[in-house]
Amino acid sequence: MQDTESSALLTDRLEPHATDASDVAGAATAQQMAAGSLNRAVLLLRAIARGGQAGAALTDIVNWTGLPRSTIHRVLAMLEETGWIERDALTRRFHLGAEFLAFGIAAAARHPIERQAATELAALSREIGQTIYLIVRSGLDGVCAARQESVSPIQTLVLRPGSHVPLGWGAGSMAILTALPEKEAAEIIAHNHKRFVAMPSFDEAAFAKAVAATRERGFASHDGLFTRGISGIGVPVRDQSSYPIAAVSTAFVSDWLDEEQRLRCASRLKETASRIARRLLGPSRPR
C-alpha cells in the first residue's frame, strides 16, 4: 500500500484535477502543466542519482538541471514528502529515498544484467588480475552497475557501483557511446559538452580523437585521457541488432600494460561481453 499511497500523493500534488464542467475547457492546459511538473520531478531524481553515494548538493542540482531554484525547492519538497528522496541532516545533501530500494529490486527482477553478468565479471577479474566494471546507460549518463575487484594488493578503483558519469567519460562509457548510431552519439556529446568541459582534465581534441579511434576499432582504449596516469579499456555488450546495452571495462596504471598486453586484455573483455550478451539474450548471438 505504501507504494500506491506515495504515487497517489505525488500525482495529487503534481496534477490539477477537473472537478466540474467549467473546468473541462482548461483540461488540456492542466494536463500540459502536469506533464511539465512530472518531467521536472524526473529531472531532479536523475540529478540526485548522479550524486551517487555522496548525494547531491542543492548547488549541484541547480547546475545539473538548469531549473529555477524556486521550482527545484517546490518539487524537492513534494518528492521528500512522498519518501522518494531524503536530505541528510548533517551534510544537507539529497539522496534517493529508501523507497527506491524496492523499486530497484523490482526493476532488477526484469532487467537482471548485474546478476547475469556477475559470474563472468568475477572470472575475468581473476584471469587478468584487474578490477572489472559493468557500465549501463541511463539517459545521458553511464552508470556503474557493478564492480568486481581483483585480488591484487594494488587496485585502480575509478568508479563505485551507482556512480554516474557523462556518457562517453571513461572507457566503458565511451564504449557504449561509440557503439550507438553516429547521429545519436553526436547528439549525446552535444548535450554533455558543458559537463565535459567542466572536468579539469578534459581535452576536447583528444576526446574527439579517442571517439573516432574507438568507433573504428570497436573498443575503447585510452592513455590518461580522463585521469592522468590511468588508462582504460572498454568493450560494449550488444543486443541482437548490435545496439549497446552495457559495457565491460577495466582501468589500470598506464605503465602496467604494453600495447600487446592491452590487445590481449581487449580480446578477453570482448569474449566476456559476448558471454554476458548470450546470458541476457539467449542462444541467439548478437550480430
Image (spheres, rainbow, N blue to C red):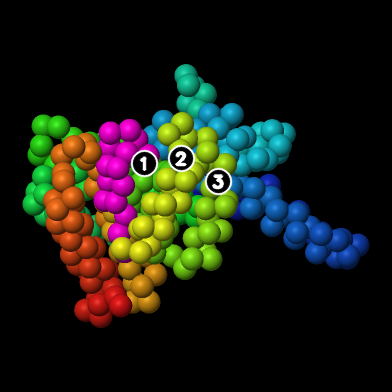
Locate residue 286, reporting x and y percent: 29, 75
- Above or below residue 151? Residue 168 is below
Q: Can residue 105 be seen in the rendering of this structure?
A: no
Determine crowd level at label 3: few under 14, some 14-19, many 20+ residues with C-alpha closer than 10 A: few
Mark 2–mark 1 distance (CA, rounded to whole Å): 8 Å
Q: Which of the two labelled residues, at mark 2 and mark 1, occupies the earlier sequence position?
A: 2
Confirm or deny contact between disc 2 and disc 1 (CB under 8 A): yes
The residue positioned 23% from the left and 71% from the top of the image is 278
The residue positioned 13% from the left and 51% from the top of the image is 261
- Where does label 2 land, which residue? 203
Q: Which residues make up the magenta segment?
A: 218-233
Front position among marks 3 and 1: 1
- Where does label 3 land, which residue? 193
Pick the residue in front: 234 or 131.
Answer: 234
- Where does label 1 land, which residue? 225
Say whether residue 271 is left or right of residue 100: left
Which residue, as the protein is rendered here, is positioned at the far top? 90
The residue positioned 60% from the left and 53% from the top of the image is 8
Question: Is 231 covered by the magenta stretch?
Answer: yes
Pick the residue in front: 94 or 247.
Answer: 247
Mark 3–mark 1 distance (CA, rounded to whole Å): 16 Å
